[in-house]
Image (cartoon, helix red, strand yellow):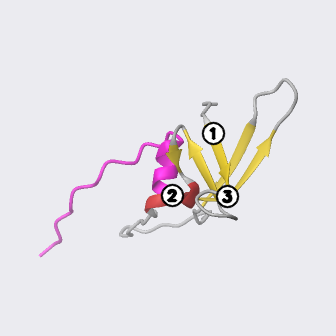
Amino acid sequence: MTRHRITIAPNTPCFGSHQLLVDGHDISRGVRSLRLSLGPGEVPSVELKLGIVEIDRMESEQADLYIPDFTREALIALGWTPPAEASAVPEDS
């Protein structure tokens, strides 16, 4: 598992809100919840739930996929590589 530098700053930028940095990238707005586990002599473990709708199965030959910018940035900060942009497919005349 890849290790990351995590910084949690409470009451930032205002009272009652928190800032979450992963390797220096602020992913606060893409995260729905965070669970932190600390054990003596163990590396801390952080479980993040991102703002993504979970789907078991969906099939479509023509669907637009929208990932909010904040969620996209959070995924990239965690090591996700976005797929290459597909070139436009010409429509049949």
**Marks 3 and 2 close (CB-CB < 8 Å):** no
Q: Mark 1 highlights which residue?
A: 6
Closer to us: 16 or 38? 16
**For the residue carrying disc 3, how many other residues have a C-alpha within 10 Å: few (<14), some (14-19), or many (20+)?**
few
Find the magenta span and give its range: 71-93
Q: CA distance from mark 1 to mark 3?
A: 16 Å
Compute the Cα span from label 3 to label 2: 21 Å
Earlier in the chain: of badge 2 and badge 1, it is: 1
Q: Residue 73 vs residue 90: left or right?
A: right
Kind of residue at disc 1:
Ile
At mark 3, the secondary structure is loop
Of the numbered discs 1 and 3, the one sitting upstream in the chain is 1
Magenta segment, prevailing SS (helix, strand or loop): loop
Residue identifier under label 2: 71
* SS state under label 2: helix
Magenta-span inclusion, residue 55: no
Quadrant of the image for the C terminus? bottom left
